[in-house]
């Protein structure tokens, strides 16, 4: 019975938050439960089962208002490479969340959405698949460091307070036409690398005109393997973890079954859409996140593979009220 359950979602206006809310309200098992969206600058429209609390993660009073009376917390809110804000929002904000949860009589479960930035993703070589047992290895910058600190903080709450939580560690999250723009040689590129900076503006413009896609190569000249997850699959993983006994105090890699092979990606786009591929040698390395633990303990399975990820991105048509706007760079 889920009656009386209230699930707080931080970062609710982002791609994962909105996918999760849609998935949650459509789930018959949670039809008697409510969602509370903790919003900062952007707001959602309230509904019969959706309430909105506006505030800042950095302010304990705002966090306390958001947590009060909730049973579950799904923590999505984050910052990117913003040194002036990231410790207040990502670290102090999560500390306030954890403190309010452990002191709340209604609290039952905390779910953190972590990131593979804390494992260095393709910045460092990984000779074997990356499992949950591997040590952290953040790449340079404050964002990757914050992903490590979030996971460590949650782990320590398990030890200090026997806290009921889990972490779903995700790689780069895609939805709609994100993947198409992640491969753009134009100024509209989503995330990194910025391909036009690697080849120069003149060549980049020619590649834009031809619809070419980059084939990222590692220092040895082999195609890079890079991990992704679709926002819908990540939302499904959250739903699988909610109230799951096997999730208690566990860390899970949540990703596609196989990373994207840039050579295979280019070959599929050439075969299906006639687009040329362009080899680009980089300092990036192959990585392979192992998601078998999530399959075993959560019963979760990703639905997106390479072909579905590509087809969904290239076939997506934006409505007039759905402009492509990037709130975070990737």
Image (cartoon, helix red, strand yellow):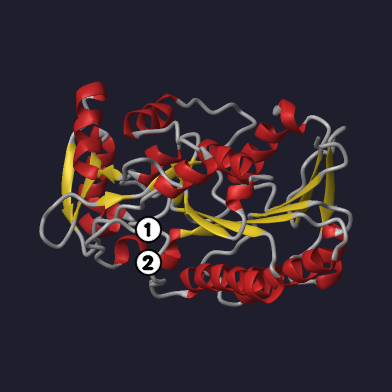
- Disc 2 crowd rating (10 Å Cα; few below 14, some 14-19, many 20+) is few
Where does residue 1 sit, x and y in percent of width and height?
A: 81, 35
Dot 2 corresponds to which residue?
A: 134
Foreground residue, 75 or 216?
75
Which corner quadrant of the image does residue 270 belong to?
top left
Would residue 2 be seen by someone viewing this image from the given angle? yes
Q: Residue at x 65, y 59 (%)?
A: 165
Mark 1 and mark 2 in contact? Answer it, CB < 8 Å: yes
Q: Which mark is residue 44?
A: none
Q: Is residue 214 above or below residue 98?
A: above
Q: Is residue 244 above or below residue 148?
A: above
Foreground residue, 57 or 181?
57
User: SS for tag 1?
Assistant: loop
User: SS for tag 2?
Assistant: loop
Q: Looking at the image, which residue sits at the far left?
A: 220
Q: In screen coordinates, is 29 left or right of 260? A: right
Q: Which mark is residue 131?
A: 1
Which corner quadrant of the image does residue 199 belong to?
bottom left
Where does residue 231 sit, x and y in percent of width and height?
A: 53, 40
């Amino acid at each position: 019975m889920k009656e009386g359950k209230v699930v707080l979602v931080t970062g609710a206006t982002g791609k994962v938050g909105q996918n999760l809310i849609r998935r949650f309200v459509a789930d018959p098992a949670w039809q008697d439960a409510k969602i509370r969206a903790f919003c900062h600058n952007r707001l959602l429209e309230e509904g019969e089962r959706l309430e909105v609390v506006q505030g800042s993660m950095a302010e304990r009073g705002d966090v306390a208002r958001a947590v009060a009376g909730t049973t579950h917390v799904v923590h999505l809110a984050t910052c990117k490479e913003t040194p002036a804000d990231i410790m207040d929002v990502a670290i102090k904000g999560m500390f306030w969340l954890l403190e309010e949860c452990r002191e709340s009589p209604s609290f039952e479960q905390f779910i953190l959405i972590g990131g593979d930035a804390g494992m260095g993703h393709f910045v460092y070589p990984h000779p074997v698949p990356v499992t949950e047992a591997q040590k952290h290895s953040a790449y340079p910058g404050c964002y990757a460091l914050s992903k490590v600190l979030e996971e460590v903080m949650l782990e320590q709450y398990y030890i200090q307070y026997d806290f009921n939580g889990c972490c779903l560690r995700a790689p780069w999250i895609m939805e709609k036409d994100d993947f198409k723009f992640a491969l753009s040689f134009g100024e509209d590129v989503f995330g990194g690398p910025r391909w036009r900076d690697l080849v120069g503006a003149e060549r980049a413009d020619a590649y834009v005109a031809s619809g070419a896609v980059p084939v990222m190569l590692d220092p040895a000249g082999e195609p890079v393997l890079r991990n992704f997850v679709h926002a819908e699959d990540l939302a499904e993983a959250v739903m699988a973890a909610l109230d799951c006994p096997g999730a208690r105090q566990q860390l899970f890699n949540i990703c596609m079954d196989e990373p994207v092979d840039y050579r295979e990606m280019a070959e599929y786009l050439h075969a299906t859409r006639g687009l040329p591929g362009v080899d680009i040698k980089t300092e990036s390395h192959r990585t392979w996140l192992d998601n078998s633990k999530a399959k075993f303990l959560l019963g979760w399975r990703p639905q997106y593979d390479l072909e579905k990820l590509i087809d969904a991105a290239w076939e997506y048509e934006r409505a007039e009220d759905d402009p492509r706007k990037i709130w975070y760079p990737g």
